[in-house]
Image (cartoon, rainbow, N blue to C red):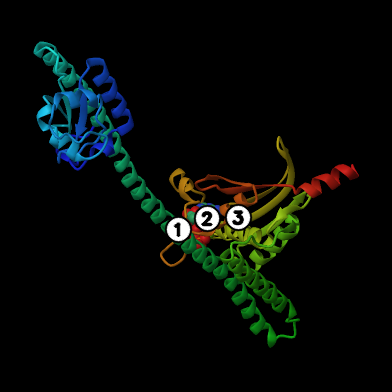
Amino acid sequence: MQNQASRPLAWRFADLLDINDIQQLQDAFAEAHQVAAVIIDLDGAPITRISQSRLLAKQAHGDTVVLPPHGAAAVDHGERAWTGAATIGVDGVKLAQWRVSRAPNMAPESFDRICGFLEQAAELVSHQARMQADLNEERAARVIAEADRDRLEQHIRLAGGMEAVGRLAGGVAHDFGNLLTAIIAYAEQLTLRLDDPEDPREPAVRILAAADRAADLVRRLLEVSRHRQGQIGAVDLPALVSETATLLEHTLPANVRVTHQVLGDVRSIEGDGSCLHAALLNLGINGGHAMTRGGDLVFTIRERDFDDGPHVEVKVRDTGEGMDNETRRRIFDPFFTTRAEGHGTGLGLTQARSCIEGHGGVIEVDSEVGRGTVFTITLPVSRSDQRSRRAAG
Ligand SMILES: Nc1ncnc2c1ncn2[C@@H]1O[C@H](COP(=O)(O)OP(=O)(O)OP(=O)(O)O)[C@@H](O)[C@H]1O
Ligand SMILES: [Mg+2]
C-alpha cells in the first residue's frame, strides 16, 4: 500500500468512482430517507443528478430554483435548501460534497439522524475511492515497471546478440586458425619437396582439402548471418574421422601417434559435415596440446543402442596431462583456456559442444590428471538410415 506522502493528489471523482453507481446509491439514500440529494465537486458543479428533486422544490418555496437535471445553477440557486452535507475524499483530500435537503415536514431530530447516516454513506464512498486510488497507483506502477522490464529485456537481447556475434566471429577465427595451420604446414612440405624428386602432389592435395574446408567455413558464416543452417546432409562419420586423423597426423608433432578404428558397422548420421569436422579437429588438437612429451591420440567409432534409438559414438582419447576437477568443470565455457596468452582462444570446445548439441547429440568428458582424457560424442543415427536398415534386415 502507498504511503500518503507519495500519493498523487490529482485524483478526480470520475477517476475513482463510477458515477452511475454513485447515482444509484444517492437515489436509494434519498428515497429511503425522503430527502433531496446531490453530489457536487469542489467548484460547486453537480457531479450527479439531484435525487427527489420534488422535495427540494417544496423546500425552496418561491425561490427561483432552476430545477434539475443539469447545471450548477440548479444547485447554487437552491443553496439555502441544502441543509446537510458530508465530504467524500481520499486521505484527507476532498473530492466532492454529498448534500441533502430536509423535507419541509421533517422533524429536526430525524434530519440529524439522517445526516449521521449520510456521514456513514459518504465514508463508505470515500473508502471505495481510496481502494480505487490504490489500484490505479498499482496499475501505474506496473505500467512503469513493465516499461522498465521491456527496456531491460531489449538491452539483454541486444547484449546477447552482440555476444553471439562475438562468439561467432571468435569461433570462425578459431577454426580458420586451425585450417591455416594445416595449409601452412602442407605448403612448407610442398616447398621442401619441389626440389625433391619425390611426388610433390600429396601436400598440394591436402592444401586444397584444407582450403575447401575454409571456403566451407566462410559459406557457413554467410548462412548464419542470413539465419540459415549449414549444409545438412548424410554424414559418414568414419570417413570424417579418417579425414580428421590424417590432417592431425600431418600437423601434430611427430611424437604424437594418431590412429583411428571403426568397430563394426556404422550408419551415417544427418548433419553438417563442416561443423562436425571442425569439432573433431578441435578435440584432436586439444589432445595433441595435452601431450607435450608425446603419446597416443586414438579415435574410436561405433554404434550404440540407447532407449531413444541408435547412436553413433565417437571417442577421442589422449594419453596427455589430463585435467583437474576445476578445469574440467569449465572447459566448455566460452573463452576458458589454460593455454599461454595468445595461444588459445578458449573457443575450441565451445564450438564443439554447440555443434554436437545442435545435432541433438551429447559431448562428455572423462579425465584424470597425469593419465589422459577421453571425450565421448554421441550423435543420433539419421532417421532415413534407421528405416533403410530395418527394411533391409
Ligand atoms: N584433451 C585435453 N587434455 C587436457 N586439457 C584439455 C583437453 N581439452 C581441453 N582441455 C582444457 O580445456 C581448455 C579449453 O579448451 P578449448 O579447446 O575450448 O580452448 P583452448 O584449447 O584453450 O584454446 P583454442 O581451442 O582456442 O586453441 C584448454 O585450455 C585446456 O585447459
Ligand atoms: Mg582447443
363 over 255 or under it: above or below: above
Alpha carbons under labels 2 and 1: distance apart: 8 Å
Alpha carbons under labels 3 and 2: distance apart: 8 Å
Q: Where is residue 130 in the image (x, y as percent from the top left)?
A: 23, 30
Along the polypeptide, which appears first: circle 3 or circle 1?
A: 1
Residue 16 visible in this rendered orientation of the protein: yes
Image disc number at residue 335:
1
- Name which quarter of the figure residue 239 lies in: bottom right
Q: Which amino acid, mark 3?
A: Cys
Image disc number at residue 48:
none
Residue designated by label 2: 350
Q: Position of residue 31 (x, y in %)?
A: 27, 18
Look at the numbered discs 2 and 1 and tell me whether their residues touch, using CB distance below 8 Å. yes
Q: What element carries label 3?
A: helix
Q: Which amino acid, mark 1?
A: Phe
Q: Which amino acid, mark 2?
A: Thr
Q: How many marks?
A: 3
Residue at the limit of the structure toward the right, as seen here: 392
Q: Position of residue 108 (x, y in %)?
A: 9, 14
Residue designated by label 3: 355
Residue at the limit of the structure toward the bottom, as seen here: 195
Q: Which of marks 3 and 1 is in front?
A: 3
State left or right for residue 45 relative to residue 25. left
Q: Which residue does the image show at 60% across and 71% down from the upper left?
A: 218
Between 90 and 153, the one nearer to me in the picture? 90
